[in-house]
């Protein structure tokens, strides 16, 4: 397996534009997580899915952010409209369940978003 | 909501010195994981601790889970330049959404010769 695949790796956009980040989890993994990483706030959990269903979106900063998982092999995180303060590295991660409440999370390479 | 804090935020050591990072959760955890992120990279899983008081070792790394399952530590013996990176703990809550993985604030380790 190629691991968790994110695209694009880098995105530079102008304020007000729509941004869509994409993620392909590892095949067979039931959980998918979206994280945002900044120097100020560290690694923040934005939302996570189980079997394509959003379980907890309490970390989504505001209505400008939305995430979908239309099937087990694809998820998107959309920001509309984007703002400079959204600049960060966005990570997608996936994991499979276990009797101990969850196994390790495998992270993608991340998407570095810059909003100018 | 659940908060996971780590101290120190940053540590600079000479190669060969020991290093310890501490992780504290505001709530009781079901289990705790540790990750390492190299500069410019993504977090990579190191280990998972499940039992109260559990201690695990990986070569020069020793991981410990507190008796109350609210804190944890990572100790590196005789650091090497390859240990450079940011170390994160990540906890799953004991109740509620059991698979919600919340990361700590991280400790950045710099090792120089």
Image (cartoon, helix red, strand yellow):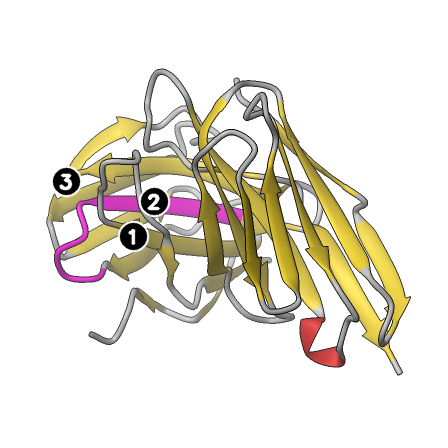
- Taking the spot 63% from the left edge, 55% from the top edge, the residue there is B62
| Residue B20 placement, left or right of B26 | right
Same subunit under labels 1 and 3? yes
Same subunit under labels 2 and 3? yes
Taking the magenta stretch, the answer to whether it contains residue A30 is yes
Badge 2 vs badge 1, beta-carbon distance below 8 Å:
yes
Mark positioned earlier in the residue sequence (2 or 3): 2
Alpha carbon of mark 2 to alpha carbon of mark 1: how far? 6 Å
Instruction: Name the quarter where the C terminus of chain B is drawn.
Output: bottom right
Badge 2 vs badge 3, beta-carbon distance below 8 Å:
no
Where does label 1 land, which residue? A94
Alpha carbon of mark 1 to alpha carbon of mark 3: how far? 12 Å
Per the rendered image, the range of residues in magenta is A26-36
Q: Chain of mark 1?
A: A
Where does label 2 land, which residue? A33
Q: Quick one: A78 or A48, which is closer to the camera?
A: A48
Residue B61 placed where, x, y %?
Answer: 64, 61
Q: Quick one: B95 or A77, which is closer to the camera?
A: B95
Taking the magenta stretch, the answer to whether it contains residue A9 is no
- Taking the spot 12% from the left edge, 56% from the top edge, the residue there is A28
Q: Quick one: B53 or B46, which is closer to the camera?
A: B53
Q: Which mark is residue A52?
A: 3
Mark positioned earlier in the residue sequence (2 or 1): 2
């Amino acid at each position: 397996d190629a691991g968790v695949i994110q695209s694009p790796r880098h995105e530079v956009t102008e304020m007000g534009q729509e941004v869509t980040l994409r993620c392909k989890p590892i095949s067979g993994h039931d959980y998918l997580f979206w994280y945002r990483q900044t120097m100020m706030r560290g690694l923040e959990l934005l939302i996570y899915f189980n079997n394509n269903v959003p379980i907890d979106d309490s970390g989504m900063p505001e209505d400008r952010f939305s995430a979908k998982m239309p099937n087990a092999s694809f998820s998107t995180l959309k920001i509309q409209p984007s703002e400079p303060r959204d600049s960060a590295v966005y990570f997608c991660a996936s994991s499979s369940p276990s009797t101990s409440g969850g196994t390790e999370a495998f992270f993608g390479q991340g998407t570095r978003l810059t909003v100018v | 909501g659940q908060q996971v804090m780590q101290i120190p935020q940053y540590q600079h050591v000479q190669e060969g010195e020991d290093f310890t990072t501490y992780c504290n959760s505001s709530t009781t955890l079901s289990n705790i994981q540790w990750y390492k992120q190299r500069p410019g990279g993504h977090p990579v899983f190191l280990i998972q601790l499940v039992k109260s008081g559990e201690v695990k070792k990986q070569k020069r790394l020793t991981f410990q889970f507190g008796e109350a399952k609210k804190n944890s530590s990572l100790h590196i013996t005789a650091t090497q330049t390859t240990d450079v990176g940011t170390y994160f703990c990540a906890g799953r809550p004991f109740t509620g959404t059991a698979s919600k993985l919340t990361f700590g604030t991280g400790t950045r380790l710099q090792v120089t010769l």
